[in-house]
Image (cartoon, rainbow, N blue to C red):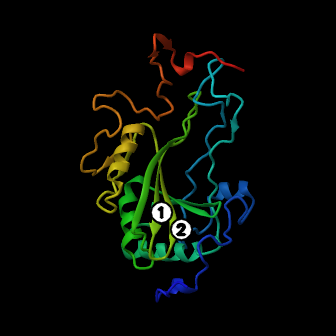
Amino acid sequence: MTEPSGTSKDDAEPTGGEHSSSEVSGAALEQQRARGGEDALAGVRPAARITETRTRSGMFGVRGSGDTSGYGGLRLPGHAPAPAERPFGGWFDEFADELGAALDERSIPRDAIEQVTIDRDEMTLYVQPAKLNAVARTMRDDPALRFEFCSSVSGVDYSAPDGSPVDRPLHVTYHLLSMTYRRRIRLEVAMDIENLHVDSVVDVYPTADWHERETWDMFGVVFDGHPALTRILMPDDWDGHPQRKSYPLGGIPVEYKGAEIPPPDERRAYS
């Protein structure tokens, strides 16, 4: 049996319990998106600014022939995180109250949290890029929150393969763990391709050092304040960021035992 921690969390619902989902909680999904959620952190909420991307088809951006992956017929819906509405369910409501109070105590405006999404029993807080470091420090230091560990930092490019405009398509996600209260939270930042700048959190979570370097290397996100933002996977003189949707697919033939294997986008399709 787990020893009591001496905090209010002893009586809270255990992690993994029944939680609400942004797809079913509150009003109809379309109304949720139109309103941007209501009173997500017990304060004035900004309008939702995390917008829907285009439906994806196929794999790796290949069009016509050349897709040898077997996923040429793949169809995925556009990424559209619906804002959650209260009551969130589980421990999420208590967490939202505590985070709102902690932001107020540190004079951090509550609209630093652009949107709250709850889906598949996971909570995501969309944070303004310029407020990320302050929010992360609050998440770590406040006694009622205590998210002591950042387990990963990674990038996601939601750009449309056909080049159609997408609002703030490049996201950076941060997975935080509270070892004190056994809780997990995701922070996410959405940015324009023309302004890929976000606060570094290395001074808050030293484990983010190489994670941020890899995200810079693969996606081109500039982490302002990082102590040594250099490439970690590609050579120092490499041109471009390989996991961006705009990056060419292969394009380099490979020689193998006297034969030449063409780049993936030039190979013959088998279906």
Q: Disc 2 marks which amino acid? A: Val
Q: Position of 91 compared to 146: left or right?
A: right
Mark 1 lies on a secondary structure that is: helix
Residue corresponding to mark 2: 44
Position of 239 compared to 19: left or right? Answer: left
Location of the C terminus (image quadrant): top right
Residue occupying image coordinates x 35% and y 27%: 239
Label 1 is placed on what type of residue? Answer: Asp
> Are circles 2 and 1 on residues that touch, CB within 8 Å?
yes
Name the residue beneath numbered marker 1: 111
Q: Is residue 94 above or below residue 58?
A: below
Relative to 118, is 92 above or below? below
Q: Which residue is at 66% across, 18% downward?
A: 269
Image coords of residue 95 (percent x, y): 53, 74
**Left or right side of 154 for 115:** right
Q: Position of residue 144 (x, y in %)?
A: 45, 79
Residue 140 seen in this snapshot: yes
Q: Quadrant of the N terminus?
A: bottom right
Relative to 107, say whether 51 is above or below. Answer: above
